[in-house]
Amino acid sequence: MDVHIQEELCNNGRDNVTQPFSLQQKNTNTYLQLYGHTEPEIISIQDDIEQYEGESNDITFQNSENEITNLHVGCIFNSWENVDTIMEVHGKKHGFTTIKKRLMRHEDGNIKHRSFGCEFGGRYQPKKLVDINKHRDRKSKRQQCTWNANFNCPQNSQNIVLTTFNNSHNHVLFPNTEEYSPKYRCIPDEVLEEIQFLTKHGNLPINTQRKLLRAKFPTLSILDCDLTNAIQKYKVKADVTHDASHLLKTLIQYKSNDPGWFVEFQLDEENRLIRLFWMSPTQIALWLEYHDVILNDNTAKTNRYQMPLSLFLVIDNNTRSRLVAQALVSDEMTESYKWILECTKNATMTEPLVFVTDADPAADAAIGQIYIITYQIHCIFHISENLPKNLKSKLCDQYENFVHDFYLCRNNVCEELFYERWSNLVEKYPSVKDYLMRALYPNRQAWARAFTSKIFTAGIQTTSRVEGLNNIIKRELQANSTLCDLASVLDSRLGNEAQWNRFFEYHTLSSCMGITSVGNDLFPEIDKIMSKYLTPHILSAERLEMAQCLYFTANKVEPDIVEDSSVNITDGFIEDLYDSKQILLKSMIAEVGGNFREIWKIADMRPENKKYVHFVVVVDPISYLCSCMSNISRGIICHHYLRVMMISTVAGFQIQMVPSRWYIDDQKDKDIVAEACYFVNQEAMQNFSGMTFIPNPSTVPMTITTVLLHDSYSEMVGWLRQFINRHKEMAIAQTGSVRNQDYPEIQVDDSNKENEPEQIGNPLVSRRKGRPETKRYKSSTEKKPRAKYTCGTCGQSGHNSARCQNRS
């Protein structure tokens, strides 16, 4: 039958070949030599190949005896491209993949000899040492398959002849091998470009990239392993040998161009970077203007050296989070925190007035030593998370009752009652007394509501703003990112913040209020002066307070009124309850002393909120205290006081009652004391018309009280801005060599050899925070089994061989 097919193809090949052909070889183990055949046995199958020259690699095979082409020794081809196509078609048909093994050329460069083999051919040659510590169970597809085909093209000949052909395999042939063989799983270049773009600029995981690629290339099919390899290919950094040095040289160059930059770093004995702190001139200006509330938190897994990244945030007048400082350190010990805080003082010459942290003991110790006048606030979320981790295993069944009693003590708004309930708490749960007195009680003023309610925090209760920024940064970085990548992401973040502020300013100037608010009807003069000074976000909050004042009734009471002093909030934090009382009336009277004019009792008319009763103590027309403490903790005039203004003969409003940090930038330097005082009640307007007032220090936020030491907040802002300008002038007047104080050899002068990148080494990989990866420690909430003896005689546990009953 084979002879018949050969003759038919030789005579009618040009007319009959109209469909893609298939190859079949019945004799699978034949070695034939070219010179052992007669002339008629050498046939040409070139006509069968012409159809493939214009088609793709996806060839449809049909099993028809009339279209079988017999590939054997002696077949002649007129180009090496046709040989490649025949080999590829033959492998696909029979369930394996052909590969090119070796190549020989003539002296003129033309191909003389080429060999093809099976992808499973060859012998596996391990390249790794036989070391049990480095041993890995790996598999190889090299199974010494003997299939091969050799082609020769003699000198000065146009014919390529199949000289040797062994068509036998020692493995199972797999159908549709083109779908899974690595040779045919090549990802197109345009898809690779898309993967590179998504990986480098989007840092997208494999699932997200697969969805995007499927939408852009609907017919594309990529295996997970291939897509993962392509992603990892573009994640690998080319050269990180001088990563730390490049970052330092960049920052020092910034400082050379603009002396307003502050850069500080430390090296170890081996000249490796261990600490780095930097602030741009914009960040320094923001710190000086909004340092009344600073948030700080550390985040991990932002760089390949596992150096913790410490971020400092402020809240600007638009209530937006602004990054004002960043630092990289090799550990999170007290000495590292002290170094970072010292850098902030050296850069700004100021200390935060309120500092919000996550209650890290090392940070608390450093803050107490470096920031003398700073008031610490602990994140209430971290406190709630630390309780079960440290106490649940010790209290067991009593834990729920302990949480009930702890929140009852923590949420109390009276200091005397706090101390009383704390003593009861320690006596009732002696098993956790050590943790309560060691970890919580020394810092009680940072987390107990009886103390924090009197501090201006701009409405901040947690470090969630810093946690959110950490999440944004980690989306653009990986655990193996370089320090230069990290600095680039932080710089991009600063640019986005500045761009948003410019857009917000444009949007504010180009828009106006479309609907008249309730506050414009009830307090037209007050709404007008607020619109002049306050930023849109704070103005919106004040208008909301104006609208809510209609839900309340106000009655004047005497100072000796009986007040319910029990605040029984046993689940969660009292700050989460918007209408809850934050301070007692007797505490407010103690704060202002006997110098007050009126006391008002405020009740909510809504049935569901009748349990919330507040008191307002009016000291003078522009000084008051309310039991909601909104004017102290947030710097916002509350709806309780606005309701009192409508009927009081004393209460009034002057713009300096709102902290200057909430003013728009153009109004911060103006003399607000000269602004008029507005009254809603006509009698009050007649009694105090034309008089000038200054707020009572006991009725303004603590931060503003501190700032008043410089006569007025606006004067302090001007003083700070003059300091920045003087700081720049002093830096410019220096010699021009910008160097670190501890390491004077690091200079900007390019002639200095110490500037070479190899002079500063990359940081050593720091130990990650948490448990070691090679050993699992049980959580404090897990039960730890007690160690038991194991008998060496009977093998049972619970006793040793000396006490074994089976001992003879």
Image (cartoon, rainbow, N blue to C red):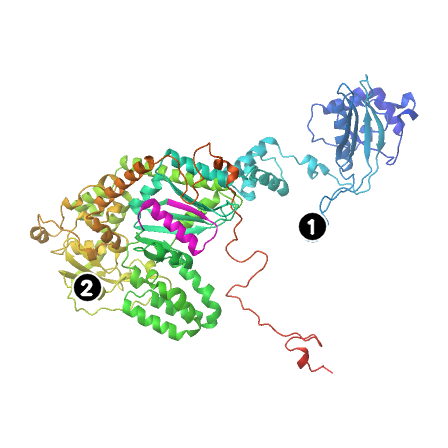
Foreground residue among 731 and 480: 731
Q: In the picture provided, is 48 more to the left or to the right than 465?
A: right
* Residue beneath the point at 30% across and 59% down: 452
Q: Does the magenta-highlighted stretch encompass residue 341?
A: yes
Query: Is 594 covered by the magenta stretch?
Result: no
State the residue position of label 2: 589
Q: Could you say where residue 153 lies in the image, as x and y percent from the top left? A: 81, 22
Closest to the observer, 407 or 274: 274
Which is closer to the viewer, label 2 or label 1? 1
For marks 2 and 1, the one nearer the N-term is 1
Secondary structure at badge 2 equals helix
In this view, the residue in front, 480 or 1, is: 480
Q: Mark 1 points at which residue?
A: 136
Give residue 430's position: percent from left, percent from top. Answer: 42, 74
Circle 2 Cα neighbour tier, 10 Å, few/some/many (<14 / 14–19 / ≥20): some
Image quarter of the N terminus? top right
Region of the chain picked out in magenta, as a range: 324-351
Give, as a three-letter code, the residue at label 1: Arg
When the figure is inspected, residue 321 is found, relative to residue 394, above or below; the finding is: above
Query: Of helix, strand and loop, which one carries label 1?
Result: loop
Which amino acid does the dot numbered 2 rest on? Ile
